[in-house]
Amino acid sequence: MNKKGYIHSIETFGTLDGPGLRTVVFFQGCPLKCQFCHNLDCTLSKIKGEEYTLKKLTEKVLKNKAYWGDKGGVTVSGGEPTFQPEFLLDFLKELKSVGVNTAIDSCLFTSKKILESVSSYVDYWMVSVKHMDKDKHKELTGVTNTMVLENIQYLDKQLVRGKSLRIRFVVIPGITDSIDHIRELGKFISRLKHLDHVELLPYGSHGAYKWEEIFGKYPLEDIREATSKDLKEVKIRLQENNNFDIYY
């Protein structure tokens, strides 16, 4: 219980990060450097976040237990939760020991060994697919997508009854919304057996000021924000020859 982790922030009444009403814990640090990231200060290793012992963090989130109801619980987000794998595993174990519903919001750029260690303590997965093309994925995030896509398929095979997976996808005009790309994304998603639904997220520049403060320039400054029309068009393309649920 004296192990320590680094936490960026805690949201007490999250309604968009998993089933029901949730407490969302944002872990500090991430191996990706997504050009459209609006939580940039949560990803940088030079920013340490607030230090928590396992005991302190567990006690803090459990104070909200009365508000979660039957479907709610705790979602671990970031940054990237698996960037602090040992602390993540111990935190999830503590939550499950008292019957808390758990969810993870992850990019899955991690090892299968880490996925194996935490998967039995996670009820619901939310996984972001940035881009299906490995070169464009690297341009957008700093890494290729090979490990990410393999881990999604691996995780899908490991999930058991009662556990499911949500795919999150950011619609960025001119970058992720081409017809060919959406078709490739649809083919990949259609093969997942434990898919709950696909969540389309509109690209927005609301995190640009953080990039400008830290690096002096926002890399996507010339990209317009996604509209509801953009999301609708992507949804229509994804629905071609596919029968999974799509929300935005």
Image: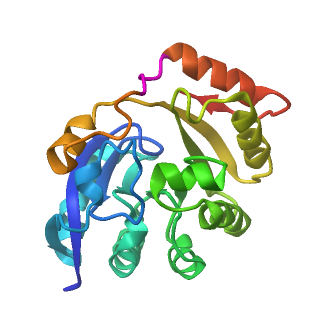
> Could you say where residue 75 lies in the image, as x and y percent from the top left?
39, 54
Magenta segment, principal secondary structure?
loop
Furthest-bottom residue in this view = 2
Q: Quadrant of residue 4?
A: bottom left
* Residue 151, above or below 101: below
Magenta stretch: give its range: 223-227
Residue beneath the point at 56% across and 28% down: 174
Instruction: Judge whether residue 198 is colored magenta.
Output: no
Residue beneath the point at 19% across and 86% down: 2
Q: Who is closer to the viewer here, 231 or 245?
A: 231
* Residue 116, above or below 22: below
Locate residue 117 relative to residue 156 in the image: left or right: left
> Could you say where residue 19 lies in the image, as x and y percent from the top left?
48, 43
Locate residue 155 relative to residue 66 in the image: left or right: right
> Could you say where residue 96 lies in the image, as x and y percent from the top left?
42, 70
Residue beneath the point at 48% across and 17% down: 227
